[in-house]
Image (cartoon, rainbow, N blue to C red):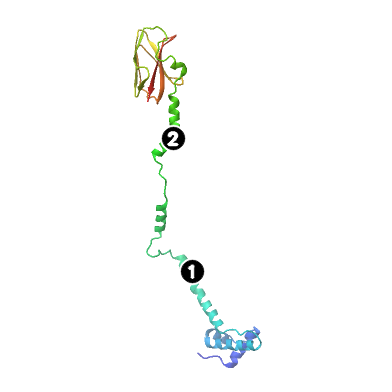
Amino acid sequence: MNHLSDIEKAQYLQASRNNSFGGIEPSIHNHILECFECRNSIVDLLGLFESEAGIKRVHHNAWIKYAVAAAMIPILGWALYRWIAEPLVPLAGIPLEEPVRKLEQTVIVPEISQENDIKKTNPVNRSLIADNFQPNPSLEYLAGSQVRAEAITIVAPELNASLSGDISFHWKSENILHIRILNNRGDVIHAAKSKDQYRLEEKLSAGLYYWKLETEDDVIYIGKFFIR
């Protein structure tokens, strides 16, 4: 490659100082862009003139920095494109889903056991059950006695018996009687008619219960039993 002559360098130097390149041949301008040696020579001359005029000399390595920066722009652009376009590559042989799996393993779901539920509800249950065993004052006073002198004999259940499952009521009487089963609040929960027996197949909840035998007009007997 042929280098610029001193006259061509001086012309380009003068144009640079005046910031006017209209009179410079395109071939000279292109040569300076391609020739590192000629470009540095002009930079040195420009720095010498500026130093003489009291201006800080421009270091000739500035051109090299600019050239390197210009060359790095397409390289960085290509690297950015590859980084966006290509999928992520696992590091050190660890699959990408591994951190997610480890995160899932660290999530602890508290197990709610049936035992805990029972413990939490037991205070309420105990209170309700205790209420179901409270005696009824009006019925308690007459429990176990025959109100009227009627020819009747109670067979089962015995007074204050503890029962479970199906409950059978037996008595001996010459007439058909009404049987009524009451909870400890005095509410009638079952009623039927029979001459000597009645079988309650429905399961009762735990508590205190009373039962009555009645004619059409009067109460004959009041009994009492517990469901445990």
Image quadrant where one finds the C terminus? top left
Question: In screen coordinates, is 72 left or right of 213?
Answer: right
- Where disc 1 sits, the SS reads helix
In the rendering, at what x and y percent does residue 213 appear?
40, 13
Dot 2: within a 10 Å radius of its alpha carbon, few (fewer than 14), some, or many (20 or more) residues? Answer: few
Q: Residues within 10 Å of mark 1 (few under 14, many from 20)?
A: few
Q: Amino acid at mark 2?
A: Thr
**Relative to 98, residue 39 above or below:** below
Q: CA distance from mark 1 to mark 2?
A: 63 Å
The answer to which quarter of the image holds residue 146 is: top left
Q: Is residue 100 above or below residue 4?
A: above
The image position of residue 143, as x and y in percent, is: 41, 15
- Mark 1 is on which residue type? Leu
**Precedes in sequence: disc 1 or disc 2:** 1
Depth order, front residue of 43/176 = 176
What residue is rendered at 64% in x and 89% in y?
Answer: 52
Q: Which residue is denoted by mark 1 in the rendering?
A: 80
For the residues carrying marks 1 and 2, which lies nearer the camera in this image? 2
Residue that appears at 50% across and 71% down: 77
Q: Position of residue 141 (x, y in %)?
A: 44, 15
Q: Looking at the picture, does residue 91 appear above or below residue 10?
A: above
State the residue position of label 2. 121
